[in-house]
Amino acid sequence: MAETYPIDDDDISVEEIEIRLLLEAIYQMYGYDFRSYSRASMRRRIMHRLSMSGFDSIMEMTDKLLRERPFFVTLLNDLTVNVTEMYRDPDFYRAFREEVVPVLKTFPFIKIWHAGCSTGEEIYSMAILLEEEGLYDRAMIYATDIDKNVLASAKKGIYSIEAVKQYGDNYRRAGGRHSLSDYFTARYDSVIMEQRLKRNIVFADHDLATDQVFGEMHVIMCRNVLIYFDRPLQERVIRLFSDSLDMGGHLCLGTKESLRFSGQEETFDVINKSLRIFRKRQFQHHA
């Protein structure tokens, strides 16, 4: 179980105590553990909801979330980060196609875990890439997130037509082989991803802060999630990923994330330094 923030401040503020109590209340009441997320990030989102809700104090907000689940759901949407798009960082997907796919083609069956999948755009990006590389039929994608609401959106695979226009440019820059429109059906002002892309995707809720190892994966994608965690939680999650990967499996992080100070640097080889693609070593060397 994650520990609460250590109380080592000489002059801790009332606001800081209230934030800690709010996060503890969320954990005790609803089971979501934000206690080891970046303090600055949590404070910013909590204060935003405080200003939007018209409460006089964080304690008032804590009381309401304990008594009214709908308000907690509103706050949960503030605390979980759902910034994503299809083929986000196109250079990453191009590198994945060139540097990871050839390894995946050597396996009879492929398991990919997308941790922190949000509303699903990057899951469908991977599904399309795998289909274009002739790998989708032997792949299983496990899409997980802490937020059941975004998981429901991801499973539907419905996105605004305006957003998809931008995604098409990302797709081309990522080395897409066809047209992105081949993979969805337009409906009024929205698009829905083709059903064939969903058949090998399993959606499940999973909390990186508290849940355990997730299978033996060939690839783990967790891009732009760790930046919202404090250092101890980052270390925990990277250990979890290492334990969840097969020998020779690939770990893909966001461009602002790294294995430095995680205690796992010796476990991985760097495949692409700038795009944060790592491969778990086949054999571990022990002193």
Image (cartoon, rainbow, N blue to C red):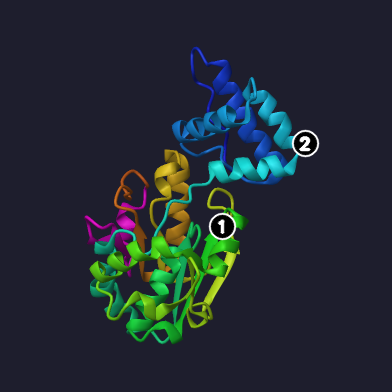
Please identify the quarter of the rendering in which residue 274 is found: bottom left
| Magenta part of the chain | 263-287
* Amino acid type, mark 2: Arg
* Amino acid type, mark 1: Val
Position of 68 with respect to 32 (left or right) is: right
Q: Position of residue 21 (x, y in %)?
A: 64, 28
115 vs 79, nearest the viewer: 79
Report the residue that reaches farthest toward the top. Answer: 11
Q: Secondary structure at mark 2?
A: helix
Image height check: is 274 above or below 127? above
Q: Is residue 270 magenta?
A: yes
According to the image, label 2 marks what residue?
67
Residue at the spot x=27%, y=63% of the render? 90
Quadrant of the rendering where the C terminus is positioned:
bottom left
Q: Is residue 68 magenta?
A: no
Q: Which of the numbered marks, if any, corresponds to residue 284? A: none
Report the residue that reaches farthest toward the right. Answer: 67
Mark sitting earlier along the chain (2/1): 2
According to the image, label 1 marks what residue?
150
Q: Position of residue 68 (x, y in %)?
A: 75, 39
Number of dots carrying numbers: 2
